[in-house]
Image (cartoon, helix red, strand yellow):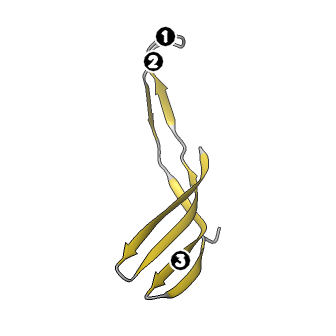
Amino acid sequence: DLTLQREGTKKEFANGEWDVDLNYIRLTPKFMYFFGEYGQAVRPKLFVGPSAGFLVGGKTKSTFSGNKIKAHVRGNNC
């Protein structure tokens, strides 16, 4: 699988907040094994494989004591 995922967090403090949004391209090759035969009512599946993520960018926003700060996050140089 090759997917684009958006991850982040938002944290609130007594005098402000912090918000982070990051974008990743994820590559997850999988090995799959099916139990039973095709067409059976119940056919369990087992799959395993690694996952690699590449940061492609994002942004952060902070507000503390009325001061606003915005920044762009740069991704990996591929």
- Measured in 3D between alpha carbons, the distance from the residue under mark 1 to the one under mark 3, in whole angstroms, is 52 Å
Q: Element under label 3?
A: strand
Residue 41 drawn at (x, y percent): 47, 11
- Measured in 3D between alpha carbons, the distance from the residue under mark 2 to the one under mark 3, in whole angstroms, is 47 Å
Identify residue type, mark 2. Arg
- Measured in 3D between alpha carbons, the distance from the residue under mark 2 to the one under mark 1, in whole angstroms, is 6 Å
Relative to residue 56, is residue 62 depicted above or below?
below
Please name the residue that numbered disc 2 is placed on. Answer: 43
Residue 59 drawn at (x, y percent): 58, 73
Relative to residue 47, is residue 19 depicted above or below?
below
Which residue is found at the position 47% from the left and 48% from the top?
50
Residue 73 drawn at (x, y percent): 58, 75
Identify residue type, mark 3. Lys
Q: Element under label 2?
A: loop
- Corner quadrant of residue 13: bottom left
Please name the residue that numbered disc 1 is placed on. Answer: 40
Q: Of label 1 and label 3, which has the lower sequence position?
A: 1
In front of the other: 20 or 13? 13
Which residue is found at the position 57% from the left and 60% from the top?
24
